[in-house]
Amino acid sequence: MFLSRALRSSCRSLHTVTLFPGDGIGPQISDSVKKIFDAAEVPIQWEERQVYPILEPNGKTRIPDDAVESIFKNKIGLKGPMRTAIGKGHVSLNLTIRRTFGLYANVRPAKSVPGVITPYSKEGVDCVIMRENTEGEYSGIEHQVVPGVVQSVKLITRDASRNVAEYAFQYAQDHGRKNIVALHKANIMKMSDGMFLEQCREVAARYPEINYREMYLDSACLKIVSDPSKFDVMLMPNLYGDIFSDLTAGLIGGLGLAPSGNMGKDGIAIYEAVHGTADDLVEANKGNPTALLMSGLMMLRHMGLKSQADKIEAAVLETLTERKVITGDIGGTATNPEYADEICRKIKG
Amino acid sequence: RSKQWYQRRVRGIAKFAFDYAREHNRKKVTCIHKANIMKLSDGLFKACCKEVSEDYPMIEYEEQIVDNTCQQLVINPQQFDVMVMPNLYGNLVSNLAAGLVGGAGVVPSKSYGENIAVFEPGARHTWMEMKGMYVANPAAMVLSSAFMLKHLQLHEAGDLLIKAVKNVINRREVQTRDLGGSSTTPEMTRAFLNELDTLYKNQ
Protein backbone atom coordinates (compact mmCIF):
# COMPACT_ATOMS: atom_id res chain seq x y z
CA MET A 1 0.00 0.00 0.00
CA PHE A 2 2.68 2.47 1.05
CA LEU A 3 5.00 1.31 -1.75
CA SER A 4 2.47 1.97 -4.49
CA ARG A 5 1.72 5.42 -3.02
CA ALA A 6 5.44 6.20 -3.00
CA LEU A 7 5.77 5.01 -6.58
CA ARG A 8 2.79 7.12 -7.58
CA SER A 9 4.22 10.24 -6.03
CA SER A 10 7.60 9.70 -7.66
CA CYS A 11 5.85 9.45 -11.00
CA ARG A 12 4.08 12.79 -10.45
CA SER A 13 5.30 15.09 -13.18
CA LEU A 14 8.66 16.67 -12.49
CA HIS A 15 8.86 20.11 -14.07
CA THR A 16 12.10 21.06 -15.75
CA VAL A 17 12.88 24.70 -15.17
CA THR A 18 15.79 26.73 -16.54
CA LEU A 19 18.07 28.37 -14.00
CA PHE A 20 20.47 31.21 -14.84
CA PRO A 21 22.49 31.59 -11.63
CA GLY A 22 24.09 34.79 -12.91
CA ASP A 23 27.14 36.60 -11.56
CA GLY A 24 28.51 37.71 -8.20
CA ILE A 25 26.25 36.42 -5.43
CA GLY A 26 24.03 34.88 -8.12
CA PRO A 27 25.38 31.31 -7.92
CA GLN A 28 25.39 31.43 -4.09
CA ILE A 29 21.80 32.63 -3.71
CA SER A 30 20.74 30.20 -6.42
CA ASP A 31 22.17 27.41 -4.27
CA SER A 32 19.99 28.59 -1.40
CA VAL A 33 16.91 28.57 -3.59
CA LYS A 34 17.68 25.03 -4.73
CA LYS A 35 18.24 23.90 -1.14
CA ILE A 36 14.99 25.46 0.06
CA PHE A 37 12.95 24.08 -2.82
CA ASP A 38 14.39 20.65 -2.04
CA ALA A 39 13.37 20.95 1.59
CA ALA A 40 9.83 21.78 0.49
CA GLU A 41 9.87 18.85 -1.96
CA VAL A 42 9.05 21.08 -4.89
CA PRO A 43 8.73 18.82 -7.98
CA ILE A 44 11.24 20.78 -10.04
CA GLN A 45 14.47 19.76 -11.67
CA TRP A 46 16.79 22.56 -12.59
CA GLU A 47 18.52 22.95 -15.95
CA GLU A 48 21.38 25.34 -15.26
CA ARG A 49 22.82 27.54 -17.98
CA GLN A 50 25.41 30.28 -18.08
CA VAL A 51 24.49 33.59 -19.62
CA TYR A 52 27.05 36.00 -20.98
CA PRO A 53 27.04 38.47 -23.86
CA ILE A 54 28.39 37.39 -27.22
CA LEU A 55 29.19 40.39 -29.38
CA GLU A 56 28.53 39.50 -33.00
CA PRO A 57 30.45 40.98 -35.90
CA ASN A 58 27.35 42.92 -37.00
CA GLY A 59 27.38 44.76 -33.67
CA LYS A 60 24.42 42.90 -32.16
CA THR A 61 24.62 41.15 -28.82
CA ARG A 62 23.25 37.69 -28.21
CA ILE A 63 23.33 35.14 -25.43
CA PRO A 64 24.65 31.53 -25.70
CA ASP A 65 22.57 29.16 -27.81
CA ASP A 66 22.15 26.55 -25.09
CA ALA A 67 20.67 29.19 -22.76
CA VAL A 68 18.21 30.25 -25.44
CA GLU A 69 17.25 26.67 -26.32
CA SER A 70 16.68 25.80 -22.68
CA ILE A 71 14.13 28.59 -22.21
CA PHE A 72 12.35 27.87 -25.46
CA LYS A 73 12.07 24.23 -24.39
CA ASN A 74 11.14 24.66 -20.73
CA LYS A 75 9.23 27.95 -21.05
CA ILE A 76 9.86 28.79 -17.39
CA GLY A 77 13.09 30.19 -15.97
CA LEU A 78 14.60 31.73 -12.85
CA LYS A 79 17.39 34.27 -13.26
CA GLY A 80 19.94 35.63 -10.82
CA PRO A 81 21.62 39.05 -11.05
CA MET A 82 23.85 39.67 -14.05
CA ARG A 83 26.73 41.99 -14.65
CA THR A 84 26.64 44.20 -17.71
CA ALA A 85 30.05 44.74 -19.24
CA ILE A 86 31.06 48.38 -19.24
CA GLY A 87 32.35 49.64 -22.52
CA LYS A 88 31.40 50.57 -25.99
CA GLY A 89 29.03 48.42 -27.93
CA HIS A 90 27.80 46.41 -24.97
CA VAL A 91 24.06 46.35 -24.76
CA SER A 92 22.72 45.59 -21.31
CA LEU A 93 22.44 41.83 -20.81
CA ASN A 94 19.01 42.26 -19.29
CA LEU A 95 17.87 44.11 -22.40
CA THR A 96 19.29 41.34 -24.61
CA ILE A 97 17.40 38.69 -22.65
CA ARG A 98 14.21 40.72 -22.90
CA ARG A 99 14.57 40.98 -26.66
CA THR A 100 15.57 37.36 -27.18
CA PHE A 101 12.46 35.99 -25.47
CA GLY A 102 10.03 38.77 -26.34
CA LEU A 103 9.44 39.56 -22.67
CA TYR A 104 6.71 42.14 -22.97
CA ALA A 105 5.32 42.51 -19.47
CA ASN A 106 7.30 42.97 -16.27
CA VAL A 107 5.41 42.16 -13.06
CA ARG A 108 6.78 43.60 -9.82
CA PRO A 109 4.74 42.95 -6.69
CA ALA A 110 5.64 44.98 -3.61
CA LYS A 111 4.27 43.71 -0.34
CA SER A 112 5.27 44.82 3.14
CA VAL A 113 7.47 42.19 4.74
CA PRO A 114 6.89 41.43 8.42
CA GLY A 115 10.09 41.93 10.36
CA VAL A 116 11.34 44.54 7.91
CA ILE A 117 10.04 47.81 9.29
CA THR A 118 9.96 50.80 6.96
CA PRO A 119 8.14 54.10 7.41
CA TYR A 120 5.39 52.53 5.31
CA SER A 121 4.88 49.34 7.31
CA LYS A 122 2.08 50.91 9.32
CA GLU A 123 -0.19 51.64 6.37
CA GLY A 124 1.04 48.50 4.69
CA VAL A 125 2.09 48.12 1.08
CA ASP A 126 0.50 45.51 -1.19
CA CYS A 127 0.70 46.62 -4.78
CA VAL A 128 1.76 45.21 -8.14
CA ILE A 129 3.47 47.12 -10.92
CA MET A 130 2.76 46.04 -14.47
CA ARG A 131 5.40 47.54 -16.70
CA GLU A 132 5.46 47.45 -20.49
CA ASN A 133 8.86 46.02 -21.17
CA THR A 134 9.75 46.30 -24.86
CA GLU A 135 9.56 49.91 -26.00
CA GLY A 136 8.78 53.38 -24.75
CA GLU A 137 11.82 55.44 -23.87
CA TYR A 138 13.97 52.33 -24.10
CA SER A 139 13.56 51.77 -27.80
CA GLY A 140 17.19 52.85 -28.09
CA ILE A 141 16.50 55.32 -30.86
CA GLU A 142 18.74 58.28 -30.25
CA HIS A 143 20.66 60.59 -32.51
CA GLN A 144 22.57 63.81 -32.57
CA VAL A 145 20.74 66.50 -34.52
CA VAL A 146 23.67 68.92 -34.54
CA PRO A 147 26.57 68.98 -32.08
CA GLY A 148 25.13 69.90 -28.71
CA VAL A 149 21.58 68.89 -29.61
CA VAL A 150 20.47 65.27 -29.24
CA GLN A 151 17.11 63.59 -29.61
CA SER A 152 15.77 60.48 -27.95
CA VAL A 153 12.66 58.88 -29.40
CA LYS A 154 9.93 57.39 -27.20
CA LEU A 155 8.18 54.72 -29.20
CA ILE A 156 4.70 53.57 -28.17
CA THR A 157 2.84 51.00 -30.27
CA ARG A 158 -0.74 49.85 -30.10
CA ASP A 159 0.29 46.20 -29.98
CA ALA A 160 2.78 46.48 -27.14
CA SER A 161 0.39 48.62 -25.10
CA ARG A 162 -2.44 46.19 -25.66
CA ASN A 163 -0.31 43.18 -24.78
CA VAL A 164 0.72 44.50 -21.40
CA ALA A 165 -2.80 45.79 -20.66
CA GLU A 166 -4.28 42.38 -21.45
CA TYR A 167 -1.75 40.67 -19.23
CA ALA A 168 -2.45 43.12 -16.41
CA PHE A 169 -6.22 42.66 -16.44
CA GLN A 170 -5.98 38.89 -16.72
CA TYR A 171 -3.48 38.83 -13.86
CA ALA A 172 -5.79 40.99 -11.75
CA GLN A 173 -8.68 38.66 -12.43
CA ASP A 174 -6.63 35.53 -11.71
CA HIS A 175 -5.26 36.93 -8.47
CA GLY A 176 -8.43 38.54 -7.17
CA ARG A 177 -7.08 42.09 -7.46
CA LYS A 178 -9.92 44.57 -7.77
CA ASN A 179 -8.30 47.81 -8.96
CA ILE A 180 -6.05 48.80 -11.81
CA VAL A 181 -4.74 52.33 -12.23
CA ALA A 182 -2.89 53.35 -15.38
CA LEU A 183 -0.08 55.83 -14.71
CA HIS A 184 0.74 58.30 -17.47
CA LYS A 185 1.59 61.79 -18.57
CA ALA A 186 -0.88 61.97 -21.43
CA ASN A 187 -1.59 65.61 -20.62
CA ILE A 188 1.94 66.29 -21.89
CA MET A 189 2.68 63.29 -24.09
CA LYS A 190 -0.69 63.32 -25.73
CA MET A 191 0.00 60.91 -28.55
CA SER A 192 2.33 58.37 -27.01
CA ASP A 193 0.87 58.07 -23.52
CA GLY A 194 -2.49 58.78 -25.13
CA MET A 195 -2.18 55.65 -27.27
CA PHE A 196 -1.15 53.65 -24.24
CA LEU A 197 -4.24 54.79 -22.32
CA GLU A 198 -6.51 54.10 -25.28
CA GLN A 199 -5.43 50.46 -25.26
CA CYS A 200 -5.83 50.22 -21.49
CA ARG A 201 -9.40 51.53 -21.78
CA GLU A 202 -10.29 49.08 -24.52
CA VAL A 203 -9.07 46.14 -22.46
CA ALA A 204 -10.70 47.52 -19.31
CA ALA A 205 -14.08 47.47 -21.03
CA ARG A 206 -13.79 43.67 -21.26
CA TYR A 207 -13.26 43.34 -17.49
CA PRO A 208 -16.18 45.24 -15.98
CA GLU A 209 -15.67 43.69 -12.57
CA ILE A 210 -12.26 45.34 -12.26
CA ASN A 211 -12.24 48.97 -11.22
CA TYR A 212 -10.10 50.87 -13.77
CA ARG A 213 -8.89 54.42 -13.45
CA GLU A 214 -6.07 56.66 -14.60
CA MET A 215 -3.70 58.87 -12.67
CA TYR A 216 -0.94 61.27 -13.55
CA LEU A 217 2.41 59.73 -12.80
CA ASP A 218 3.55 62.68 -10.72
CA SER A 219 0.38 62.55 -8.63
CA ALA A 220 0.99 58.87 -8.09
CA CYS A 221 4.52 59.54 -6.81
CA LEU A 222 3.18 62.04 -4.33
CA LYS A 223 0.26 59.92 -3.22
CA ILE A 224 2.07 56.64 -2.87
CA VAL A 225 4.54 58.03 -0.35
CA SER A 226 1.68 59.62 1.55
CA ASP A 227 -0.40 56.44 1.74
CA PRO A 228 0.75 53.38 -0.21
CA SER A 229 -2.14 51.25 1.04
CA LYS A 230 -4.38 52.98 -1.50
CA PHE A 231 -2.56 51.38 -4.43
CA ASP A 232 -3.35 47.99 -5.94
CA VAL A 233 -2.33 47.09 -9.51
CA MET A 234 -0.57 49.83 -11.47
CA LEU A 235 -0.13 49.65 -15.23
CA MET A 236 2.33 51.82 -17.14
CA PRO A 237 4.81 52.19 -20.00
CA ASN A 238 8.47 51.22 -19.77
CA LEU A 239 10.34 54.14 -18.24
CA TYR A 240 7.71 54.95 -15.64
CA GLY A 241 7.58 51.28 -14.70
CA ASP A 242 11.32 51.08 -14.31
CA ILE A 243 11.42 54.07 -11.97
CA PHE A 244 8.20 53.39 -10.12
CA SER A 245 8.98 49.74 -9.39
CA ASP A 246 12.24 50.74 -7.70
CA LEU A 247 10.23 53.26 -5.69
CA THR A 248 7.79 50.58 -4.53
CA ALA A 249 10.67 48.22 -3.74
CA GLY A 250 12.06 50.99 -1.54
CA LEU A 251 8.74 51.25 0.31
CA ILE A 252 9.01 47.62 1.47
CA GLY A 253 12.71 47.60 2.27
CA GLY A 254 14.64 47.66 -0.98
CA LEU A 255 15.59 45.68 -4.03
CA GLY A 256 17.05 42.91 -1.89
CA LEU A 257 13.54 41.80 -1.05
CA ALA A 258 11.61 42.51 -4.23
CA PRO A 259 10.59 39.73 -6.65
CA SER A 260 9.98 40.18 -10.37
CA GLY A 261 8.53 38.22 -13.26
CA ASN A 262 8.73 38.73 -17.01
CA MET A 263 6.13 37.39 -19.39
CA GLY A 264 7.01 36.48 -22.96
CA LYS A 265 5.13 35.03 -25.89
CA ASP A 266 4.13 31.38 -26.11
CA GLY A 267 3.93 30.99 -22.38
CA ILE A 268 7.52 31.95 -21.63
CA ALA A 269 7.90 33.33 -18.13
CA ILE A 270 11.24 34.30 -16.60
CA TYR A 271 11.42 35.27 -12.95
CA GLU A 272 14.36 37.22 -11.65
CA ALA A 273 16.02 39.02 -8.79
CA VAL A 274 16.42 42.63 -9.89
CA HIS A 275 19.14 43.62 -7.50
CA GLY A 276 22.81 43.76 -8.45
CA THR A 277 25.58 41.22 -8.26
CA ALA A 278 26.88 42.57 -4.91
CA ASP A 279 30.43 41.45 -5.67
CA ASP A 280 31.67 42.65 -2.28
CA LEU A 281 29.52 40.03 -0.52
CA VAL A 282 30.73 37.04 -2.53
CA GLU A 283 33.78 36.13 -0.48
CA ALA A 284 31.88 35.88 2.79
CA ASN A 285 28.78 34.45 1.09
CA LYS A 286 26.60 37.09 2.70
CA GLY A 287 24.16 37.90 -0.08
CA ASN A 288 20.42 37.93 0.63
CA PRO A 289 18.59 35.23 -1.36
CA THR A 290 15.13 36.56 -0.46
CA ALA A 291 14.46 38.44 -3.70
CA LEU A 292 15.48 35.45 -5.83
CA LEU A 293 13.50 33.13 -3.57
CA MET A 294 10.36 35.30 -3.72
CA SER A 295 10.72 35.44 -7.50
CA GLY A 296 10.93 31.64 -7.38
CA LEU A 297 7.68 31.57 -5.41
CA MET A 298 6.00 33.79 -8.02
CA MET A 299 7.22 31.19 -10.51
CA LEU A 300 5.78 28.30 -8.52
CA ARG A 301 2.39 30.00 -8.30
CA HIS A 302 2.48 30.61 -12.04
CA MET A 303 3.14 26.89 -12.49
CA GLY A 304 0.20 25.97 -10.25
CA LEU A 305 2.42 24.77 -7.39
CA LYS A 306 0.63 26.97 -4.88
CA SER A 307 0.83 24.77 -1.79
CA GLN A 308 4.62 24.45 -1.97
CA ALA A 309 4.92 28.19 -2.57
CA ASP A 310 2.74 28.91 0.47
CA LYS A 311 4.74 26.51 2.63
CA ILE A 312 8.04 28.16 1.68
CA GLU A 313 6.62 31.66 2.02
CA ALA A 314 5.36 30.95 5.53
CA ALA A 315 8.83 29.76 6.55
CA VAL A 316 10.49 32.83 5.01
CA LEU A 317 8.09 35.27 6.67
CA GLU A 318 8.51 33.55 10.02
CA THR A 319 12.29 33.76 9.74
CA LEU A 320 12.13 37.43 8.82
CA THR A 321 9.68 38.24 11.60
CA GLU A 322 11.85 36.55 14.22
CA ARG A 323 14.85 38.61 13.05
CA LYS A 324 17.24 36.07 14.63
CA VAL A 325 18.84 34.56 11.51
CA ILE A 326 18.71 37.26 8.84
CA THR A 327 21.27 38.75 6.44
CA GLY A 328 23.24 41.98 6.77
CA ASP A 329 21.28 44.11 4.33
CA ILE A 330 18.22 43.91 6.60
CA GLY A 331 20.08 44.34 9.85
CA GLY A 332 21.27 40.84 10.72
CA THR A 333 24.58 38.98 10.75
CA ALA A 334 23.76 35.63 9.18
CA THR A 335 25.41 34.36 6.03
CA ASN A 336 23.41 33.34 2.99
CA PRO A 337 23.62 29.60 3.77
CA GLU A 338 22.78 30.14 7.46
CA TYR A 339 19.63 32.04 6.50
CA ALA A 340 18.67 29.37 3.96
CA ASP A 341 19.24 26.59 6.49
CA GLU A 342 16.97 28.36 8.99
CA ILE A 343 14.21 28.51 6.37
CA CYS A 344 14.72 24.81 5.56
CA ARG A 345 14.45 23.98 9.28
CA LYS A 346 11.13 25.76 9.49
CA ILE A 347 9.83 24.05 6.36
CA LYS A 348 10.70 20.60 7.67
CA GLY A 349 8.99 21.61 10.90
CA ARG B 1 7.91 62.43 -28.82
CA SER B 2 11.59 63.18 -28.54
CA LYS B 3 13.80 64.73 -25.94
CA GLN B 4 15.88 67.56 -27.25
CA TRP B 5 18.85 68.55 -25.28
CA TYR B 6 20.38 71.85 -25.87
CA GLN B 7 23.84 71.91 -24.46
CA ARG B 8 23.64 75.61 -23.70
CA ARG B 9 20.43 75.22 -21.75
CA VAL B 10 21.67 72.20 -19.85
CA ARG B 11 24.78 74.08 -18.85
CA GLY B 12 22.45 76.91 -17.82
CA ILE B 13 20.38 74.75 -15.48
CA ALA B 14 23.48 73.07 -14.10
CA LYS B 15 25.06 76.45 -13.37
CA PHE B 16 21.80 77.57 -11.75
CA ALA B 17 21.91 74.53 -9.48
CA PHE B 18 25.48 75.14 -8.37
CA ASP B 19 24.94 78.88 -7.91
CA TYR B 20 21.85 78.12 -5.84
CA ALA B 21 23.84 75.66 -3.75
CA ARG B 22 26.53 78.21 -3.14
CA GLU B 23 24.14 81.02 -2.21
CA HIS B 24 22.14 78.84 0.15
CA ASN B 25 25.11 77.10 1.81
CA ARG B 26 24.22 73.73 0.36
CA LYS B 27 26.97 71.13 0.34
CA LYS B 28 26.18 68.77 -2.52
CA VAL B 29 24.59 68.62 -5.95
CA THR B 30 23.34 65.29 -7.30
CA CYS B 31 22.69 64.92 -11.03
CA ILE B 32 19.77 62.55 -11.63
CA HIS B 33 19.74 60.74 -14.98
CA LYS B 34 19.24 57.50 -16.90
CA ALA B 35 22.28 57.71 -19.12
CA ASN B 36 22.94 53.96 -18.91
CA ILE B 37 19.87 53.53 -21.15
CA MET B 38 19.47 56.92 -22.83
CA LYS B 39 23.13 57.20 -23.61
CA LEU B 40 23.00 60.23 -25.91
CA SER B 41 20.36 62.45 -24.38
CA ASP B 42 20.84 61.82 -20.67
CA GLY B 43 24.50 61.26 -21.45
CA LEU B 44 24.73 64.84 -22.70
CA PHE B 45 22.85 66.13 -19.67
CA LYS B 46 25.17 64.31 -17.31
CA ALA B 47 28.31 65.43 -19.16
CA CYS B 48 27.23 69.08 -19.01
CA CYS B 49 26.54 68.88 -15.29
CA LYS B 50 29.92 67.28 -14.68
CA GLU B 51 31.61 70.00 -16.72
CA VAL B 52 29.92 72.77 -14.74
CA SER B 53 30.68 71.06 -11.43
CA GLU B 54 34.37 71.57 -12.08
CA ASP B 55 33.88 75.30 -11.66
CA TYR B 56 32.57 74.76 -8.13
CA PRO B 57 35.24 72.72 -6.34
CA MET B 58 33.85 73.52 -2.88
CA ILE B 59 30.55 71.83 -3.68
CA GLU B 60 30.39 68.03 -3.75
CA TYR B 61 29.08 66.58 -6.99
CA GLU B 62 27.67 63.12 -7.64
CA GLU B 63 25.52 61.36 -10.20
CA GLN B 64 22.72 58.85 -9.62
CA ILE B 65 20.39 56.82 -11.79
CA VAL B 66 16.80 58.00 -11.42
CA ASP B 67 15.21 54.67 -10.48
CA ASN B 68 17.71 54.21 -7.68
CA THR B 69 17.04 57.81 -6.64
CA CYS B 70 13.34 57.07 -6.14
CA GLN B 71 14.23 54.05 -4.05
CA GLN B 72 16.75 56.04 -2.02
CA LEU B 73 14.23 58.84 -1.47
CA VAL B 74 11.82 56.50 0.26
CA ILE B 75 14.47 54.65 2.21
CA ASN B 76 16.84 57.45 3.24
CA PRO B 77 15.86 60.87 1.87
CA GLN B 78 18.26 62.66 4.24
CA GLN B 79 21.19 61.71 2.00
CA PHE B 80 20.07 64.26 -0.60
CA ASP B 81 20.78 67.97 -0.80
CA VAL B 82 20.44 69.83 -4.11
CA MET B 83 19.31 67.65 -7.00
CA VAL B 84 19.48 68.66 -10.65
CA MET B 85 17.74 66.74 -13.42
CA PRO B 86 15.91 66.86 -16.73
CA ASN B 87 12.26 67.81 -17.00
CA LEU B 88 10.41 64.51 -16.65
CA TYR B 89 12.49 63.20 -13.76
CA GLY B 90 12.11 66.58 -12.10
CA ASN B 91 8.35 66.23 -12.27
CA LEU B 92 8.44 62.80 -10.66
CA VAL B 93 11.12 63.48 -8.06
CA SER B 94 9.66 66.80 -6.94
CA ASN B 95 6.25 65.22 -6.46
CA LEU B 96 7.76 62.30 -4.60
CA ALA B 97 9.70 64.69 -2.40
CA ALA B 98 6.56 66.77 -1.79
CA GLY B 99 4.76 63.61 -0.67
CA LEU B 100 7.57 62.88 1.78
CA VAL B 101 7.24 66.24 3.53
CA GLY B 102 3.50 66.60 3.68
CA GLY B 103 2.05 66.80 0.21
CA ALA B 104 0.83 69.27 -2.37
CA GLY B 105 -0.64 71.57 0.25
CA VAL B 106 2.62 72.60 1.88
CA VAL B 107 5.31 72.72 -0.78
CA PRO B 108 6.12 76.03 -2.49
CA SER B 109 8.21 76.58 -5.59
CA LYS B 110 10.00 79.19 -7.62
CA SER B 111 10.54 79.13 -11.38
CA TYR B 112 13.15 81.28 -13.09
CA GLY B 113 13.47 82.34 -16.68
CA GLU B 114 16.03 84.77 -18.05
CA ASN B 115 14.02 87.86 -17.13
CA ILE B 116 11.04 86.42 -15.31
CA ALA B 117 10.37 84.72 -12.00
CA VAL B 118 7.17 82.82 -11.22
CA PHE B 119 6.17 81.63 -7.76
CA GLU B 120 3.59 78.87 -7.40
CA PRO B 121 2.74 75.77 -5.35
CA GLY B 122 5.37 73.12 -6.05
CA ALA B 123 3.22 70.14 -6.92
CA ARG B 124 1.11 72.11 -9.41
CA HIS B 125 -2.00 70.00 -8.86
CA THR B 126 -5.28 71.78 -9.53
CA TRP B 127 -7.40 69.30 -7.52
CA MET B 128 -10.39 70.01 -9.74
CA GLU B 129 -12.66 67.63 -7.82
CA MET B 130 -12.60 69.96 -4.82
CA LYS B 131 -13.14 73.18 -6.70
CA GLY B 132 -15.43 75.49 -4.77
CA MET B 133 -15.31 73.36 -1.61
CA TYR B 134 -12.69 75.46 0.19
CA VAL B 135 -10.86 72.49 1.70
CA ALA B 136 -7.45 73.05 0.12
CA ASN B 137 -4.45 74.00 2.23
CA PRO B 138 -3.37 77.54 1.31
CA ALA B 139 0.08 77.05 2.87
CA ALA B 140 1.83 76.16 -0.39
CA MET B 141 0.47 79.24 -2.12
CA VAL B 142 1.23 81.53 0.82
CA LEU B 143 4.79 80.17 1.15
CA SER B 144 5.30 80.68 -2.59
CA SER B 145 4.25 84.30 -2.18
CA ALA B 146 6.71 84.61 0.71
CA PHE B 147 9.44 83.43 -1.67
CA MET B 148 8.30 86.10 -4.07
CA LEU B 149 8.64 88.76 -1.36
CA LYS B 150 12.17 87.56 -0.62
CA HIS B 151 13.03 87.62 -4.30
CA LEU B 152 11.94 91.26 -4.28
CA GLN B 153 14.40 91.72 -1.39
CA LEU B 154 11.51 92.22 1.08
CA HIS B 155 13.16 89.75 3.43
CA GLU B 156 11.61 90.89 6.65
CA ALA B 157 8.10 90.48 5.35
CA GLY B 158 8.90 87.22 3.58
CA ASP B 159 10.56 85.66 6.63
CA LEU B 160 7.73 86.75 8.91
CA LEU B 161 5.19 85.13 6.61
CA ILE B 162 7.17 81.87 6.44
CA LYS B 163 7.47 81.79 10.23
CA ALA B 164 3.73 82.40 10.65
CA VAL B 165 2.83 79.53 8.33
CA LYS B 166 5.30 77.16 9.98
CA ASN B 167 4.07 78.02 13.49
CA VAL B 168 0.44 77.37 12.55
CA ILE B 169 1.27 74.05 10.94
CA ASN B 170 3.48 72.91 13.80
CA ARG B 171 0.89 73.85 16.40
CA ARG B 172 -1.50 71.32 14.78
CA GLU B 173 -4.60 73.14 16.02
CA VAL B 174 -5.94 74.42 12.72
CA GLN B 175 -5.32 71.80 10.06
CA THR B 176 -6.83 71.28 6.63
CA ARG B 177 -7.66 67.78 5.39
CA ASP B 178 -4.25 67.08 3.93
CA LEU B 179 -2.73 67.63 7.37
CA GLY B 180 -5.24 65.32 9.05
CA GLY B 181 -7.74 67.91 10.22
CA SER B 182 -11.00 69.33 8.96
CA SER B 183 -10.37 73.06 8.84
CA THR B 184 -11.39 75.00 5.77
CA THR B 185 -9.19 77.16 3.57
CA PRO B 186 -10.49 80.41 5.10
CA GLU B 187 -9.98 79.03 8.63
CA MET B 188 -6.38 78.19 7.80
CA THR B 189 -5.86 81.62 6.27
CA ARG B 190 -7.36 83.25 9.39
CA ALA B 191 -4.91 81.22 11.50
CA PHE B 192 -1.96 82.51 9.41
CA LEU B 193 -3.23 86.09 9.80
CA ASN B 194 -3.63 85.75 13.57
CA GLU B 195 -0.15 84.31 13.86
CA LEU B 196 1.28 87.11 11.71
CA ASP B 197 -0.40 89.61 14.04
CA THR B 198 1.16 87.95 17.09
CA LEU B 199 4.61 87.75 15.52
CA TYR B 200 4.48 91.33 14.35
CA LYS B 201 3.42 92.57 17.79
CA ASN B 202 6.23 90.60 19.49
CA GLN B 203 8.91 91.95 17.19
Image (cartoon, grey):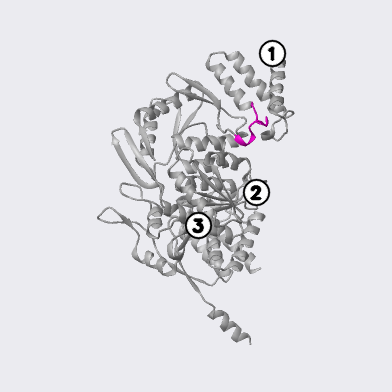
* Above or below, B196 relative to A155: above
Q: Nearer the viewer, residue A173 or B192?
A: A173
- Give the amino acid at mark 1: Tyr
Task: Please tell me whether residue A138 is drawn above or below residue B129 in the rendered image.
Answer: below
**Residue A133 visible in this rendered orientation of the protein:** no
Depth-wise, is mark 3 or mark 1 nearer the camera? 3
Residue at 55% of width from left, 54% of height from top? A205
Name the kind of residue labelled 2 in the image.
Gly
Element at badge 1? helix
Query: Which residue is identified by label 2?
Result: A124
Which tag, 2 or 3, sits closer to the chain's start? 2
What residue is pinned by disc 1? B200
- Where are the magenta residues, as a range? B127-138
**Which residue sits furthest right?**
B173
Question: What residue would you read off at disc 3?
Answer: A166
The image shows residue A29 at horizontal and vertical percentages of: 50, 59
Q: Was residue B56 drawn as part of the magenta stretch in this picture? A: no
The residue lying at 39 percent from left, 31 percent from top is B49
Q: Quadrant of the C terminus of chain B?
A: top right
